[in-house]
Amino acid sequence: MIDTPKGLVSPTMATKRVAASMAKRKKSERNFQRLGRGAIAVALAFLVVLFFSIFSKGLPGFFQYYVEIEVDIDRERLDPTDDLSLQSLYDGDARGVIRSALYAAVDAEGRSNKRAAGKLISPGAEQRLRKMVYNDPSLMDTTQTLRFALDDDVDSFLRGFIKRETPEKDRRINDRMVEYIDRLQADGKIIYAFSDYLIFGSASRNPEMAGIYGALMGSILTLSVCLVLAFPIGVATAIYLEEIAPKNRITEIIEININNLAAVPSVVFGILGLAVFIGIFGMPRSIPLIGGVVLALMTLPTIIISSRAAIRAVPPSVREAALGVGASQVQTIFHHVIPLAMPGMLTGTIIGMAQALGETAPLLMIGMVAFIVDVPGSVTDPGTVLPVQIFMWADFAERMFVQKTSAAIIVLLAFLITMNAAAIIVRKKLERRW
Amino acid sequence: MIESQKVAIPEVPDLDLAKLPNATIGDIYVETPRMTARQVRVNYGDKIAIEDVSLDIGSCEVISFIGPSGCGKSTFLRCLNRMNDTIKTCKVSGDIRLNGDDIYAPDVDVVPLRARVGMVFQKPNPFPKSIFDNVAYGPKIHGLAEDSGHLKKIVQEALERAGLWPEVHNRLDDPGTGLSGGQQQRLCIARAIAVSPEIILMDEPCSALDPIATARIEQLIHELSSEYSIVIVTHSLQQAARVSRRTAYFHLGRLVEVGLTDELFMKPQHEMTNNYITGRFG
């Protein structure tokens, strides 16, 4: 016998069956809620682990060890031609001046002792002294207590990464240096302070002098180029495709291709930038201008897709109202559609910019991975960007770069959060939905 | 098992094309026409929405379009200010003139046309801007105001004529969308009036409103009719009877019958009109 359908169920029977099915429904709802909570818990746990690891490693990276020594700023040794020109200062013996002060501080006598003492201080110290007297000549022929960064090995020793118990021949600092460090510490001359090199320094092979200033400026310049190109082009494309373009085969093909571009691996855009801008147009490598253009190409699909969605979400009644009082198509778009779609467009732009900020691969292709000490002042100066800087530092062997890398990651995150916060504030201002 | 009870269902009259009259019954002409439509036909792609509609709209008269859903009354209304242009597949043929000028002539720009023929929509659709900006928008884009003082005067007068001024004069900067439904619709009417049109088209302006707000709007239509021609599409026969001087009955894309409202409701000439207004279908 085949069970034939019996048709409508009587109301009493229906009530019973609905009641019977409730338990199952409630159970599945509860399960779904539990699943959701579980997922959030896992995600939060990962986030906590991530932040804990970054901050525990990175926060010490914002500080480093300095030594304070009495420096006798001798005009004759520092400024041989006595005209305070940079040339003269570079000809002078800044290193000697600092070293004499250091030898005096630790009572280093004899060649080998002096050599050991000389290794304590960062090579960046002399440059700092030159800059100081160049900016303030009144310091000449005075004795000042000056603060200089310690060498990265000393820093790592003080942090305990280089162990005192390690045999001398396996240690990067010898017993005499250890002795001097102990002595300076006993005298209260070693200071653990906020690392100005990290923020104001640029790329350097000496970890104690390495900083993110150049990379930060590079990132700002690159992103500026990216934003200036991607936002207007993306929004204009979205408006044209949504509002003006006739719906035909050609626009359909364009649409499909834009959607496909959003899924293209970013490194491909780097190859494109390399081939077109550097290969065909012969533009210089490593410059934020090309970095920005490449990132703009990468960001465009994101901005276009989200802008189109935002435009589509504008109620047709608003368009009709505008057309009804005699606004032209362009007036309707600019007075009504764009203001209403702007929050959505900005959301897409934020997402795109955040992607661009963290992007490394396409910039490697166009040579923004070069070791560049100078801080880029314009979009055509060679430079690098934060994520590439992090990538490079992570590759270096010195122990101190580990902290610097984490510190740079924190700066990158802070940059990202600042950028997003600014965009959210702008969006909230525009989003006065009546 | 409970057996479903049998309910007497009124017989739905046959919607047969053959029953449509060959020509519109009644007088399509008026003495002082502001707008004249002749043999208007609208296609959406292959589908014919309205065919062979000819009608005059007199100056300072209120004319209602009635008829069942899908009969083409809104389509015809939207031909009068070329709002149908926004629909890509829509094709309008025939001849529609405003004060003797062909509004579908190739050199006609829809912008000045829509300034002369205003429109109020079914759902109140104020701009998401302040009350003042809603009314000021039209005059601003058309450059009607000489200065900001003049603009304020225009806004005030438009709101006064729409009967909204006493309610909003002290909160012109509040959002237009914060008003009640009836107030929003009057704001939309004020917005249409602000550009000083000759004709105001209203597409079921009261269908989203409660009876009190509806009465306000009807009164307003009555007041406005001394200066503007008003074309109103409505599903409410009572409303048509209350507000309009003439009524046009559309069916299946044809203008079946047109005449003075009283006469059309008292003595409909065509069987379909009779069926519709006596509530036998529609």
Image: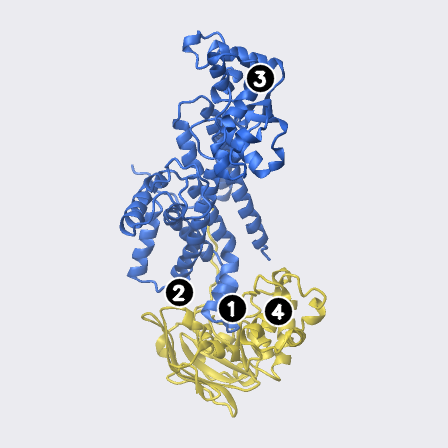
Chain colours: A blue, B yellow
Instruction: Give me the C-alpha separation between circle 1 and circle 3.
Output: 83 Å
Instruction: Work out whether B140 lies above or below A76.
Output: below
Q: Amino acid at mark 2?
A: Ile
Sooner in the amino-acid sequence: mark 1 or mark 3: 3
Q: Position of residue B182 (x, y in %)?
A: 63, 66
Density class for disc 1 (Cα within 10 Å; few <14, some 14-19, many ≥20) is many
Instruction: Work out whether A209 lies above or below B233.
Output: above
Residue on which the image places disc 2: A244
Front residue of A165 and A8? A165
Front residue of A322 and B271? A322
**Quarter residue B260 falls in:** bottom right
Q: Amino acid at mark 4?
A: Leu
Residues at discs 3 and 4 both on one chain? no
Residue on which the image places disc 1: A322
Residues at discs 2 and 4 both on one chain? no
Residue on which the image places disc 4: B187
| Chain containing the residue with disc 1 | A
Residues at discs 1 and 3 both on one chain? yes
Q: Which of pointers 3 and 4 indicates the residue nearer the eye?
A: 3
Report the residue at 54% width, 41% height from top: A418
Q: Which of pointers 1 and 4 indicates the residue nearer the eye?
A: 1
Instruction: Give me the C-alpha separation between circle 1 and circle 4.
Output: 14 Å
Q: Amino acid at mark 3?
A: Ala
Mark 2 lies on a secondary structure that is helix
Residue on which the image places disc 3: A104
Mark 4 lies on a secondary structure that is helix
Report the residue at 48% width, 42% height from top: A217
| Chain containing the residue with disc 2 | A
Front residue of A22 and B131? B131
Instruction: Work out whether A411 lies above or below B185.
Output: above
**Number of callouts:** 4
